[in-house]
Image: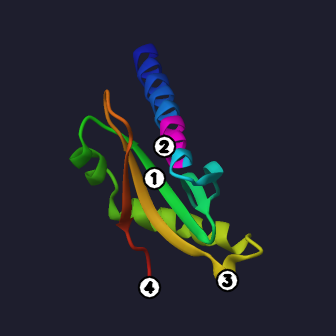
Amino acid sequence: MIDLRAKRFKAYRRGHRGEWLAALALMLKGYRIVARRYRTKLGEIDLIARRGDLVLIVEVKVRATLIEAMDAIARQSERRIEATTDLWLSRQPDHGRLSIRFDMVAVLPRRWPIHVENIFYGRT
């Protein structure tokens, strides 16, 4: 039981560190971080970043390889992220003029985070 708690805590810390690095990488690209770990009953968005009218909904994955990170976003995760995004958007006063893009930032060992644009496209 204690070993399981220790593993969970280690994964939790690794996730926080990965999100911090992802946020830093996006800020250096000129994005403003609007929200971190945006939670609702429908789900959670790791990062919401904005530059002008472009809003990035960012899933952060800490994995050993880029392929593993990309494979970690399942269709069920996409639906959860889309539903949470719809709720976030409905609360924005300027939602009508915003463009949404679903991105991923892969945090890999001993590398700068890799920003993958349009990891999925959402509902049309």
Q: CA distance from mark 1 to mark 3?
A: 23 Å
Q: Secondary structure at mark 4?
A: loop
Q: CA distance from mark 4 to mark 2?
A: 29 Å
Residue that badge 4 annotates: 124
- Amino acid type indicated by mark 1: Glu
Name the quadrant containing residue 95: bottom right
Q: CA distance from mark 3 to mark 2?
A: 28 Å
Q: CA distance from mark 1 to mark 4?
A: 20 Å
The percent position of residue 29, horizontal first and vertical second, equals 50, 51
- Amino acid type indicated by mark 4: Thr
Total labels drawn: 4
Q: Nearer the viewer, mark 1 or mark 2?
A: 2
**CB under 8 Å between discs 3 and 2:** no
Asked whether residue 24 is drawn in magenta, I would say yes
Residue that badge 3 annotates: 96
Asked whether residue 119 is drawn in magenta, I would say no
Magenta stretch, residue numbers: 19-26
Image quadrant holding the N terminus, namely: top left
Nearer-N-terminus badge (3/2): 2
